[in-house]
Image (spheres, helix red, strand yellow):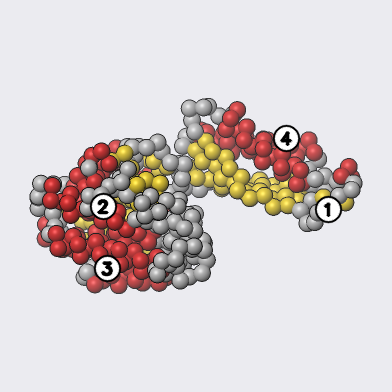
């Protein structure tokens, strides 16, 4: 599934209208987006620490003559306004991950242990590209496009809530967000009419037993043994305690216990994640984790501590906004390259926006087997096919215009 057509070729085929831009402008915009993506990729910053990132975004927006306002510590917002009309918001997240990059490009991360391993560098670059297009077409713009550059998507509580609390969704008619993904080929777009992503929760467990000598297990309460049983028994929640037609995931990510090879562990700590779509299943899984933990610890004479932290809520798209993105994406990449997968079990704080106003979140394919761009998001070798960025820029740009009506 490789798309060889360029955006220029597609624009030649499509009927021209007053929202189209010249081929020269398109080529310049594409080059600008790639340049910006490489800059931000080279200088990644962690969640709520995107100081230099925010400063460069501000500089680029102010070059376009836009008034830029700070939201929280590192978030930014800017409006592009034409004649009176609706307001549509476009969002890009700007933070990186605590990952050590293993790619060897000249623009690889210069900040050790920090990497744009989820493609937020591309999100920033594409929204800046959209800003250039909109400023150039401002005289034909009927309404306002609000540009949201959001901090800390990767770290709950996330940066989206800052924009909501400061009133930047007030009187906004619709919001659009996009995310690059390497598991979908370049030139394809994935949209979701309603549910797109899951509730993303975290749990933390501490088991307290009684330590002892490894040669006398009968005189101890082995917290490591109990934790091991607990990891296994947790899997029965999904397989035996929730309806098969209501998806859930329970994953233990860490288990830390023990001091030495001949010492029975007195304590064990586990952390994990729960992913659900249904609110009732979310509540049930939460309670079943503690029920199993309580019973297991009681059986072995141990005690426990249990914390359950609700993360980002499920991301539910507005069907009407999604229909607009579907139409626009079909124009840009071709109808047969717009796909509708099952909802993803990942989490996204864009969900806070769609709980407030109509909105839609879609995925832009950036994988390319021929270029060996296949590593998943969050991988130290994650990359994007930069040829796909022109599609994302164009889709965001046209979606804004169409939603303004």
Q: Which residue is mark 2?
A: 391
Name the residue at 28% across, 41% down: 338
Can you give x and y, in whole percent of width and height, for residue 264 in the image?
Answer: 82, 50
Q: Which residue is mark 4?
A: 295
x and y percentages locating residue 232 in the rendered image? 67, 37
**Which residue is identified by label 1?**
263
Circle 2 — which element? helix
- Discs 3, 4 touching: Cβ within 8 Å: no
Residue at the image point whose x is 49% and y is 33% from the top: 247
Count residues near mark 1 (Cα–Cα under 10 Å), then give few for <14, some for 14-19, many for 20+: some
Count of number-bearing discs: 4
Q: Secondary structure at mark 3?
A: helix
Residue 290 percent across, percent down from the top left: 65, 39
Q: Quadrant of the N terminus?
A: top left
- Give the SS element for disc 4: helix
Tell me which corner region of the image, top left, top right, bottom left or bottom right, holds residue 167: bottom left
Q: How far apart are the alpha carbons under marks 3 and 1?
A: 60 Å
Q: Nearer the N terminus, badge 3 or badge 1? A: 3
Mark 2 or mark 1, earlier in chain: 1
Q: Earlier in the sequence, mark 2 or mark 3?
A: 3
Q: Which residue is mark 3?
A: 61
| Between marks 4 and 2 in the image, the one whose residue lies nearer the viewer | 2
**Mark 3: few/some/many CA within 10 Å (<14, 14-19, 20+):** some
Residue 31 is left or right of residue 286, and the answer is: left
Q: Pick whichever, 364 or 359, lies toward us.
A: 364
- Give the alpha-carbon distance from disc 2 to disc 3, as whole Å: 21 Å
Residue at 36%, 51% (x, y): give it.
370
Q: Residues within 10 Å of mark 2 (few under 14, many from 20)?
A: many
Give residue 240's quadrant in the image.
top right
Of helix, strand and loop, which one carries label 1? strand
First-in-chain label (1 vs 4): 1
Q: CA distance from mark 3 to mark 4?
A: 58 Å
């Amino acid at each position: 599934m490789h798309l060889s057509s360029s955006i220029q070729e597609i624009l030649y085929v499509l009927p021209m209208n007053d929202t189209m831009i010249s081929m020269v402008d398109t080529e310049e915009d594409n080059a600008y987006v790639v340049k910006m993506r490489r800059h931000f990729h080279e200088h990644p910053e962690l969640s709520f620490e995107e100081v230099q990132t925010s400063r460069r975004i501000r500089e680029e927006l102010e070059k376009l003559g836009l008034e830029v306002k700070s939201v929280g510590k590192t978030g930014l917002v800017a409006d592009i306004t034409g004649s009176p009309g609706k307001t549509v918001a476009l969002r890009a997240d700007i933070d990186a991950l605590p990952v050590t990059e293993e790619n060897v490009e000249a623009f690889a991360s210069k900040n050790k242990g920090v990497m744009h391993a989820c493609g937020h560098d591309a999100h920033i670059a594409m929204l800046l590209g959209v800003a250039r297009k909109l400023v150039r077409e401002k005289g034909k713009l009927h309404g306002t496009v609000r540009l949201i550059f959001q901090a800390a998507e990767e770290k709950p509580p996330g940066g989206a809530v800052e924009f909501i609390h400061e009133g930047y969704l007030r009187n906004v008619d619709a919001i659009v967000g996009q995310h690059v993904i390497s598991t979908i080929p370049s030139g394809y777009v994935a949209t979701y009419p309603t549910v797109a992503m899951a509730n993303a929760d975290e749990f933390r467990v501490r088991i307290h037993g009684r330590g002892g000598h490894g040669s006398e297990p009968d005189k101890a309460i082995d917290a490591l043994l109990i934790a091991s049983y607990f990891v296994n028994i947790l899997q029965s929640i999904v397989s035996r305690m929730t309806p098969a037609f209501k998806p859930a995931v329970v994953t233990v990510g860490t288990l830390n216990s023990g001091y030495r090879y001949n010492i029975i562990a007195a304590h064990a700590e586990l952390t994990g994640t729960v992913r659900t779509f249904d609110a009732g299943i979310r509540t049930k899984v939460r309670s079943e984790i503690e029920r199993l933990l309580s019973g297991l610890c009681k059986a072995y004479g141990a005690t426990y501590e249990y914390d359950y932290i609700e993360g980002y809520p499920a991301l539910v798209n507005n069907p009407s906004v999604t229909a607009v993105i579907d139409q626009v994406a079909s124009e840009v990449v071709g109808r047969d390259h717009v796909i509708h997968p099952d909802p993803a079990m990942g989490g996204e704080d864009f969900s806070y926006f769609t709980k407030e106003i109509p909105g839609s979140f879609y995925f832009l394919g950036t994988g390319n087997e021929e270029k060996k761009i296949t590593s998943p998001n969050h991988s130290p070798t994650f990359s994007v096919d930069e040829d796909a960025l022109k599609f994302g820029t164009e889709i965001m740009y046209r979606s804004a215009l169409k939603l303004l009506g």
